[in-house]
Image (spheres, coloured by chain):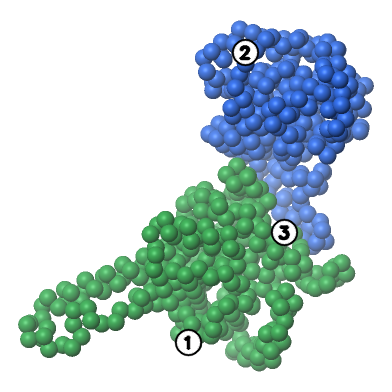
Chain colours: A blue, B green
Amino acid sequence: MRLRLPRIAVCSNVLGTAQLINRALYRQLYSSPLDSEYDRLYPGHIPTTPVQKALLAVGSGAAALQNPYRHDMVAVLGETTGHLALVRLRDRMRNDPEGYAILTERPRIRLSTLDLAHLAALPEGSFGREYLRFLDENRVTPDTRADVKFVDNEELAYVMQRYREVHDLLHTLLGMPTNMLGEVAVKWFEAAQTGLPMCILGAALGPLRLSSSRLRTLAASLGPWALRSGSRARCVLSVFYERRWDQSLDELREELGIEPPPPLTLTSTKKANTAHAGLVS
Amino acid sequence: MAASFRCVFRRLLRDCMLKVNVVSTHHASKPIYPAYGIVCRCYSDDFQGKSTHFGFETVPEEEKAERVYKVFESVAQKYDVMNDAMSLGIHRLWKDTLLHIMNPLPGTRLLDTAGGTGDISTRFLDYTRSQRERQQRRTIRSQQTLSWQDMTSTPSSNGQQELAESTAVVCDINKEMLKVGKDKAEKMGYSSGLSWVVGDAEELPFADDQFDVYTIAFGIRNVTHIEQALEEALRVLKPGGRFMCLEFSKVSNPVLSSLYDAYSFQLIPVLGEVIAGDWKSYQYLVESIRRFPDQETFKGMIEDAGFFRVQYFNLTGGVVAIHSGFKL
């Protein structure tokens, strides 16, 4: 059992701190100016003790609940609580040939790596074209995702980063807009798929902020559809999207096991962008 | 006796070096004695000068000032909120104690170095104003017992005296912190008696013998060359002026010390991340506290700079210490 449960006894704090200080003093004697406690495993990595992770989880959860626009707090909550789910996701990816390719090649979805002109030239109904349409219509970019900081394993950090970057693609695959209802639907799908505690929490608390009519839509059609698709679908992180831009969207949905989305009434995109950035990771 | 001989020797050297310092820029000026911290001469093949500590990291001296600037630039907006959260509000008591020990009379000129958001200066103004009111009440009460003849015969009566105004100068190297402090002071209603100056504690932009009291609260551990800051303090103080430093220090009690360490290292960076979104600045904060010299060593450094009657007061079991010295 690799997960260490947080221990709150003072003596273990002291031991942990003593170790931290010993390590730091060792570094003090032998460090060069370019050596640092940070960025050891991957750029942006901050090492934390189990006590710190527990405190971060509680603190970031409280901060995110109090101010839902604190996207960084939602991200920190995901990182500190998601160890088990990340391990499970990573193992699922390893067992899948395409997922294994992703883990070895480590593609990143960024504006700098996307060829937008090529995507625009693709035929209608193809995955790449629909994705570009989604980005334009909702006025979002893939560059707003925070970097992973508190995951203490380099591979799991990449899995977390991939999960964040795939979120927009999931919107396209599920055909959901970036308003609150669409975000909650995508969250339910992700909760069923990944089992990340932060997704489950978001899925449970998201509906509280919906109006009653949207809540009815969620309960009647969107919710069950999202849960069904999420539990039956193939692991969405294992799909090498960068090589499938020209594949037809319907064909991709069938391959992954995602049912076609139920029809949505036209909803406004007010506050869509902030909701979108907030509910991802 | 050894201390005073060292003082004289140092002053002689400093006078010789003064001319050199005047022409050199801030970054090129080297202290006569190495700054406190590890002087990694054997590891200095990579970089030009000496190195110093930045928390638990070792960095070139030139880099430290810049990195400290960046830290405070990023924490400026949430600085006061974080102070309250980290110290559970106790920092207000510490600063009040500093003022009580200072016990300034009305008409005092204060220089609040590394004053940042102006906590010490605003407290100083409150203190001197209440002292002024108390003085006035006392004079009125004493005048009420005078006879009619005495009242008319005394030349300076009924508020014709020149009342000296207490002034505070807030000096900080970081413009963001000064901005936050200025806005805060305006909101709190302090209009007169405060001025805000950008300046480096190692090279103050003031003439000699200007101030009655020099304070530096939670700032001196961020200075690259502490001895230089102490010498500058000596320079700008009037003879008879008082140097006061409020700073984190060593806790001697081992039980309290381990609790304090656990609290600092486990909780404070977490608070920094949750409240201010900045882990690294608050990790630097707790590390820089550990690198600062303890009460006796710092007292020795103040004496070496030329201050007399140096003493320190431990607050909260040694978590914080107030060092005080006089220029004679």
Residue underneath mark 2: A265
Quadrant including the N terminus of chain A = top right
Subunit of label 3: B
Q: Earlier in the sequence, mark 3 or mark 1?
A: 3
Identified at 65% across, 62% down, the residue is B69
Q: Is residue B155 above or below residue B92?
A: below
Residue underneath mark 1: B239
Q: Quadrant of residue B132?
A: bottom left
- Describe the element under mark 3 as helix, strand or loop: loop
A145 with respect to A32 (left or right): left
Q: Position of residue A96 (x, y in %)?
A: 89, 20
Identified at 62% across, 58% down, the residue is B72
Quadrant including the C terminus of chain A = top right
Q: Which residue type does callout 1 highlight? A: Pro
Q: Quadrant of residue B253?
A: bottom right
Q: Nearer the viewer, mark 3 or mark 2?
A: 2
Q: Position of residue A126 (x, y in %)?
A: 84, 19
C-alpha distance separating marks 1 and 2: 80 Å
C-alpha distance separating marks 3 and 1: 38 Å
Q: Position of residue A103 (x, y in %)?
A: 88, 30
**Circle number at residue B304:** none
Subunit of label 2: A
Q: Are marks 3 and 2 in contact (CB under 8 Å)?
A: no
